[in-house]
Image (tube, rainbow, N blue to C red):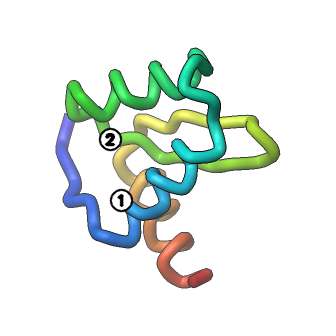
Amino acid sequence: MEKIDISKEDTQYLKELYSQLNDDDERLKELKELEKIGLDVSLELSGFDIEYNYNLEEVKKELATRRNSN
């Protein structure tokens, strides 16, 4: 899978997302595992509903959308 660069804004977004999940939350563990093995992950927070997206084009769109909304 092609890897994309993670910007400071994206890193901040991930940190904010992590901070909203309990340390013992299985989703947090999974997010950290995915990050550790370098998969491209698109994250959306709707309540605590996290959606993983492994399609590179979708990831790029999500990151662009997130940047434009800030």
Q: Is residue 40 left or right of residue 19?
A: left
Count of numbered circles on the image: 2
Q: Which mark is residue 40?
A: 2
Q: Position of residue 65 (x, y in %)?
A: 55, 72
Residue drawn where x is 53% and y is 34% of the image: 52
Residue drawn where x is 36% and y is 59% of the image: 11
For residue 24, above or below residue 65? above
- The answer for how far apart the CA atoms under marks 2 and 1 are is 13 Å
Q: Is residue 42 left or right of residue 36?
A: right
Instruction: Using a 10 Å C-alpha cutoff, classify the residue at mark 2 as few (fewer than 14 neighbours), some (14 to 19) or many (20 or more).
Output: many
Which one is nearer the viewer's eye here, 23 or 57? 23
Q: Earlier in the sequence, mark 2 or mark 1?
A: 1
Pointer 1: what residue? 11
Quarter-of-image position of residue 34: top left
Which one is nearer the viewer's eye here, 36 or 59? 36
Residue type for callout 1: Thr
